[in-house]
Amino acid sequence: MAANESARTRSTRLTDVSPTVAVIVVIFTVDDGELKVLLISRSAEPSRGLWSLPGGILAHDESLDEAASHKLRDETGVTDVYLEQLYTFHNLDDQRSVAVAYFALVDSRQAQLAHRRTWRPAWFPIAGLPRLAFDNNGVIDYALQRLRAKLDYSNVAYSLLPPYFTLSQLQRVHEAILFRPLDKRNFRKRMLSLGIIEPTGRTATEGAHRPAQLYAFRERRPVIF
Amino acid sequence: MAANESARTRSTRLTDVSPTVAVIVVIFTVDDGELKVLLISRSAEPSRGLWSLPGGILAHDESLDEAASHKLRDETGVTDVYLEQLYTFHNLDDQRSVAVAYFALVDSRQAQLAHRRTWRPAWFPIAGLPRLAFDNNGVIDYALQRLRAKLDYSNVAYSLLPPYFTLSQLQRVHEAILFRPLDKRNFRKRMLSLGIIEPTGRTATEGAHRPAQLYAFRERRPVIF
DNA sequence: GCAAAAGTGTTCTCTGTACACCCATGT
DNA sequence: ACATGGGTGTACAGAGAACACTTTTGC
């Protein structure tokens, strides 16, 4: 789409250097009943020392989706998770840059956070985030809003859970994302009537109480309903 | 967000020229009971002679929103209309480029299409578009999907109508966007119960039939409900 | 008086929500 | 036996969808 007709309208001088294109990723997980986001401590200026979302310059041999996917793998080791483009921001860092934001959902049990010499990435509970570099707090808010909307009419939660899970686990994931308790009976009724999960016949014993049925998502890829 | 931490992970050689950043705009209107989109005939390669969405390279002194807004004004003369970022595409033109797509809603009665030496932009009914340059057909489909979703839980239609309008006009706009007839009584009940429009007390006589009440949107800016 | 669009209510179905008790297990 | 989380049904309210006739005007 580059030169879509307007080279004429708006002369493109060579001195008009193209802005830098960066890709940043809001990586969510639900761990210990809490919604958390992955942050890294900035080792470079600007905003050295502050926490920020992981991201990087778009390399010349990768697409936007690939760049987001690579960044996600670099930080958490996971692939094949829910990853969706969120929004494209401008001048987040007061430089000449365009930042394409993505959001991803990972099962914290599967994630192996990168080791780094100075700092490693770390999970931060969404409630009570520190002040972040650039406008990253705004980006996270926006991602959360989108996640909550999707939760209601898609199966995105598959990406936050292991292949087999109990309905209580699924409910805790929803509650952590929505920041409010849900009614057990209504929740189960809804999930089952949507037809996105199915009982596996297996059960899991996990304490001094009745074992739970294990369920699985019918599709471990995005489905909208 | 440019250098968000990854300058280390992925070395940024100077030979890694940044991709071009373009902005393209899907401009919708409802005219003559039909949903239409604004297309221009490409005067430049690639795809010279094909119809495509209006767009252009991001200038160094404008933000993404500004670029979209400028492009919209250049083609239609209108400002202060509904304009929302849609999605950022990659390699739409098989060049090294990133295209940030927007969609806009304009009242065709207000739009003054640009005059150009070779071709002028023109409105095309959504149903039965020609094959467009790049993947522009896909971009328009995506924009339409988003527009339909918004129509149901926002007041975006304000941007497709004059300040005073009848409920029948509003209904025709909805029907043109949704491609299906709506029930008059249910439509009116819903619009009024949402509280986004209000009667003005004025009426409009428009033919050999009973005059219609004129309504106005309470807010002529985006409101979600 | 006739053609044309404006305007107006009721019924039914479905979905979301509120709400409380018994069950199976480990200790 | 008791503590713990697993599992289940019903009643009510609100929203969306179907559906037909009267009103006001210009000609």
Image (cartoon, coloured by chain):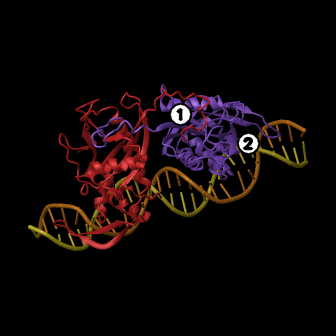
Chain colours: A purple, B red, C orange, D yellow
CB under 8 Å between discs 1 and 2: no
Residue occupying the far front of the picture: A15
x 43%, y 63%: residue: B194
Which class describes the residues within 10 Å of circle 1: few (<14), some (14-19), or many (20+)?
many
Q: Residue A47 at what x, y percent from top left?
A: 62, 44
Q: Is residue B216 left or right of residue A100?
A: left
Which class describes the residues within 10 Å of circle 2: few (<14), some (14-19), or many (20+)?
few
Q: CA distance from mark 1 to mark 2?
A: 33 Å
Residue at the spot of label 2: A32
Vertical order, A38 against A61 (above or below)? below
Q: Residue B142 at what x, y percent from top left?
A: 39, 40
Q: Give whichever of A89, B124 is nearer the camera.
A: A89
Q: Identify the subunit bearing mark 1.
A: A
x 35%, y 44%: residue: B25
Residue type, label 2: Asp
Q: Please tell me in which quadrant of the rendered image residue B138 appears.
A: top left
Q: How many marks?
A: 2
Residue A57, numbered label = 1
Q: Quadrant of the N terminus of chain A?
A: top left
Residue type, label 1: Ile
Dot 2: element: loop
Marks 1, 2: nearer the viewer: 1
Q: Residue B182 at what x, y percent from top left?
A: 33, 54
Dot 1: element: strand
Q: Please tell me in which quadrant of the rendered image residue B215 appears.
A: bottom left
Tags 1 and 2 both on a single chain:
yes
Q: Give whichever of B152, A9 is nearer the camera.
A: A9
Q: Residue A162 at what x, y percent from top left?
A: 66, 32
Q: Identify the subunit bearing mark 2.
A: A
Labels 1 and 2: the sequence-earlier one: 2
